Amino acid sequence: MKKHLLTLCTIAVTQFCYAQNCIEVTDAAFNPGTDGTTWKLDFSFIANGNKALEIKVNCGATVILDTCFTTNGSGSASFTGLICPGGSAALSAAFTPHTGNCTSATCGPVVTEPPSGGPLPINISTFYAQRKNTTVSLGWQTLTEINAKEFVIQR
């Protein structure tokens, strides 16, 4: 009897844990709209059953989209909006997974685009390299640098 009770408890715990798995964002990127005045946020996700994903898009520090995306399986989706005053370089998105709907508990890591700790977006207008004997000089001009501290040249 104890063996059957243990088996039933194991099955119940497994089913509960499996039901709580999160939606997982596997890819996300901002793309320019076709008319030059809009942006498009494309993302792919893996989900098993009904899941919710809170999506916030910022232009600098201002939230310009705050929505709850729900799904009943894996796939991809996109959202569009108007280019903000800082241009596409000022855009960022945060994806927060939830166990049920967007007012329930969060689960899993928050995914950001551009990725946290990665290179920041800049718009380069010109870039050149000039060789003088054994030395190469690099030069560039940027149109925008949002929160950029420095440039690091890697070989």
Image (cartoon, helix red, strand yellow):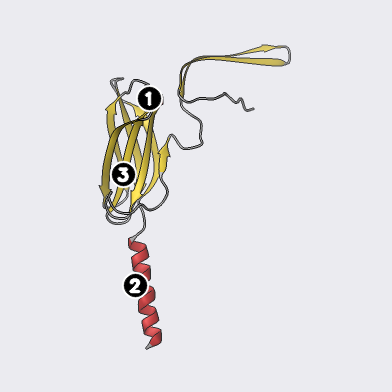
- Give above or below for 142 relative to 74: above
SS of the residue at dot 2?
Answer: helix
Q: Which mark is residue 12?
A: 2
Which residue is outermost to the front? 61
Q: Residue at x 38, y 68 (%)?
A: 14
Expressed as whole percent of the image width and height from the top left, the position of residue 60 reads 38, 27
Say whether residue 44 is left or right of residue 134: left
The residue labelled by disc 1 is 88
Disc 3 residue type (three-letter): Glu
Q: Residue at x 56, y 24 (%)?
A: 150
For label 1, count other residues whose C-alpha is less than 10 Å away and answer few (under 14), some (14-19) or many (20+).
Answer: many
> Residue 147 versus residue 93: which sits nearer the camera?
147
Expressed as whole percent of the image width and height from the top left, the position of residue 79 reads 28, 35
For label 2, count other residues whose C-alpha is less than 10 Å away and answer few (under 14), some (14-19) or many (20+).
Answer: few
- Give above or below for 145 relative to 2: above
Please tell me which of labels 1 and 3 falls first in the chain: 3
Tell me the quadrant of the picture where the C terminus can be found. top right
Q: Which mark is residue 54?
A: 3
Real-space Cα distance between discs 1 and 3? 21 Å
Q: Residue at x 39, y 74 (%)?
A: 10
Disc 1 residue type (three-letter): Ser
